[in-house]
Image (cartoon, rainbow, N blue to C red):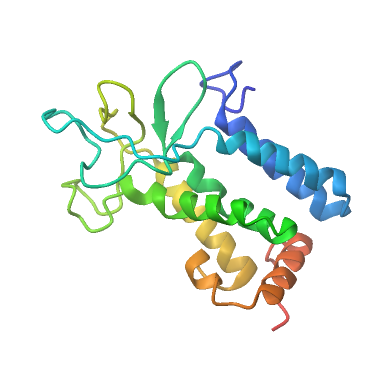
């Protein structure tokens, strides 16, 4: 609870994300199974905030901001007690992929892909959404009625949530995302993953 100061004392997604990061760091530092088990519990809790199915938009609502031709999978509830959703789980694709490499559970890899790619559906990557600049996306919107209505503003964290894991994948595996990483032999991925836990990508990897 209380993962962010502007929405305290509620069960929220951000608290799950921060718990996951902390338990992963403890596992990197100690190698103790109890911290990996705790990381899995935090990951399982956090992903329950994600929409794993598509919520269609109303076709006759001119105030709907979510693109009607795209899907809502990968967007996530921010917290309990309200219905706002955003792309905040974009931040965590790297940690979920690392969890897959540690556990061998492909479920975490699939969730990581949804976080990295599906959450981009609200981003104006190709300038077709009519936003002032490419790569803008609305900070939060609703998937309850009236569906697709948003706050109609972009905040810097939206871009950070997308860019942060890209840089972490580059630091750890020398690629920018999961699609590229899947071409790398699994044992090599695991070797780089373990090394990243010791150096956080600060030191050059052994090729």
Closer to the camera in the image, 127 or 37: 37
Label total for image? 0
Q: Quadrant of the N terminus?
A: top right
Residue at 79% x, 62% y is 198
Residue 150 position in % (x across, y down): 28, 29
* Residue 168 higher or lower than 207, as above or below: above
Residue 130 position in % (x across, y down): 15, 47
Residue 64 falls in image quadrant:
top left
Residue at 58% x, 17% y is 10
Q: Residue furthest bottom?
A: 207
Apparent side of residue 171 relative to residue 73 in the rendered image (left or right):
right
Residue 185 position in % (x across, y down): 64, 78
Residue 82 appears anywhere in the view = yes
Residue at 40% x, 40% y is 53
Residue 196 falls in image quadrant:
bottom right
Q: Quadrant of the C terminus?
A: bottom right
* Residue 92 higher or lower than 174, as above or below: above
Residue 182 falls in image quadrant:
bottom right
* Residue 99 higher or lower than 146, as above or below: below
Apparent side of residue 171 relative to residue 80 in the rendered image (left or right):
right
Apparent side of residue 185 relative to residue 80 in the rendered image (left or right):
right
Residue 142 position in % (x across, y down): 33, 27
């Amino acid at each position: 609870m209380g993962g962010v100061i502007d929405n305290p004392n509620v069960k929220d997604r951000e608290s799950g994300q921060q718990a996951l990061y902390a338990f992963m760091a403890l596992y990197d530092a100690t190698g103790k199974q109890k911290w990996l088990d705790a990381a899995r519990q935090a990951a399982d809790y956090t992903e329950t905030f994600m929409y794993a199915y598509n919520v269609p938009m109303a076709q006759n609502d001119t105030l709907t901001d979510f693109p009607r031709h795209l899907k809502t999978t990968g967007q996530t509830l921010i917290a309990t007690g309200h219905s706002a959703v955003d792309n905040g789980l974009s931040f965590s694709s790297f940690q979920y992929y690392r969890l897959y490499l540690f556990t061998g559970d492909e479920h975490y890899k699939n969730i990581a892909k949804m976080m990295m790619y599906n959450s981009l559906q609200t981003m104006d990557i190709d300038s077709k959404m009519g936003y002032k600049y490419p790569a803008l996306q609305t900070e939060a919107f609703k998937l309850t009625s009236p569906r697709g209505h948003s706050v109609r503003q972009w905040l810097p964290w939206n871009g950070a949530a997308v860019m942060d894991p890209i840089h972490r994948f580059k630091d750890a595996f020398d690629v920018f995302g999961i699609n590229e990483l899947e071409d790398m032999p699994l044992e090599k991925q695991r070797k780089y993953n373990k090394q990243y836990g010791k150096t956080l990508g600060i030191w050059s990897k052994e090729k």
